[in-house]
Image (cartoon, helix red, strand yellow):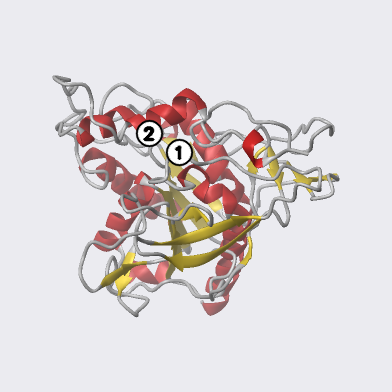
Amino acid sequence: MVTPMKIPTLLGAAATLLFAAFLPGPAGAQSPALQQGVGAVDYADGDSWLCRPGRENACAIDLATTVVRADGSLSREAWSRSAAAPIDCFYVYPTVSTDATPNSDMTPNEAELRVVAQQFARFGSVCRPFAPSYRQVTLAGLRTRMAGGDVPDLATGIAYEDVRDAFHHYLENDNGGRGFVLIGHSQGSFILTELIRQEIDGKPLQSQMVSAMLLGATVTVASGRDTGGSFATIPLCRSATQTGCVVTYVSFRETAGPPENTLFGRATVAGENAACTNPAALGGGSAPLHSYLSADGTTIVGGRPGPPWVEGGPAIETPFVSTPGLLSAECATNEHATYLEVTVHGDPSDPRADNIGGDLTPQWGLHLVDVNIGMGNLVDIVRRQGAAWGGGR
């Protein structure tokens, strides 16, 4: 039996760096020069994309999964990309770059490849995948910014401009009138929120937006409504066949809700509330999460591998595991925030692991696995929304 204490929640040097990025730097630290004024990225160059249809790239990976049931039995779940996906997915990844400058370069390294594997490649079974590289604010840049240094906001500057330019290139050269889903996490969600405000909300292009999945960042609505706040006319998704809507949540454990100094889930404007849509039950209530977690227990920032999913069981040879019945979720509100409350149903009497990793500090909640914990639900939503959007046309 694997007890909760045996699942590590400290995820090694990469996770430590992510947390440190939000702490003040040492006294007298100097901000490196910003990567501004260096020209626009050429998104006609295929190397400027992590994922594009028909290319052997960051999305062309093995996503086979071992299903780990509570009784310790294992089965293998195959995965394949769709050759005839009816819609497109456009993904903007979160803050993962370990480049030393405030904004990253355009050369993807292990961090960018890893986050695509964790958060986006699986959507290739239901949509054509598009994921641009962009000069994001790096982990080092976040630290400098939090210390008062001259680093742009996450949703402005060249990071936003790159994503905007990539999106325009996609629309002009690849879209052809197809429906699209926007998918982002953390910094990626901040950028996509701004992109939607400027390019989509209330504009003709809104008719092509199948949905937006803005995860790991706070999206707001007017109190008591599904619109207002972040967007004027785009509502929250309340069913998997509703289109032109937003799926959004930030996740915390049922045993450790958002604290007073939470980084997520709190509206700062009077008359607005933070939004939450449960990917397992868009209409509300509690429901099982269909998770896809790393078989070795690492997350989007890497970290040390954890213990086995089944004590004494055979080695798991797939890169991912799914754990039916282990996690459930519902949207909740405490005195500090609105959030996706995740319950872990570990059973010490069965051989399966009783917990998951993904925590950093109470402020962050389960930020490192926001997407993983609901991946199967999110993919299913896109599948059903794509069919509904096509049928509605």
Q: Which residue is more in the foreground, 288 or 371?
A: 288
Badge 1 marks a residue whose secondary structure is loop
Q: Is residue 82 above or below residue 223?
A: above
- Count every numbered label the image shows and give the total: 2
Mark yes or no: residue 287 visible: yes
Q: Which residue is more in the foreground, 186 or 108?
A: 186
Q: Which residue is mark 2?
A: 19
Mark yes or no: residue 210 visible: no
Place residue 19 in its image quadrant. Answer: top left
| Amino acid at the residue labelled 2 | Phe
Q: Is residue 385 above or below residue 157?
A: below
Q: Is residue 332 left or right of residue 346?
A: left
Residue at 75% over, 47% down: 348
Badge 2 marks a residue whose secondary structure is helix
Q: Answer whether labels 1 and 2 touch (C-beta < 8 Å).
A: yes
Image x and y of residue 285, in percent:
56, 73
Place residue 283 in its image quadrant. Answer: bottom right
Residue at 18% over, 31% down: 36
Q: Is residue 149 above or below residue 367?
A: above
Q: Which residue is more in the foreground, 336 or 152?
A: 336
Q: Which residue is mark 1?
A: 360
Image x and y of residue 202, in percent:
28, 72
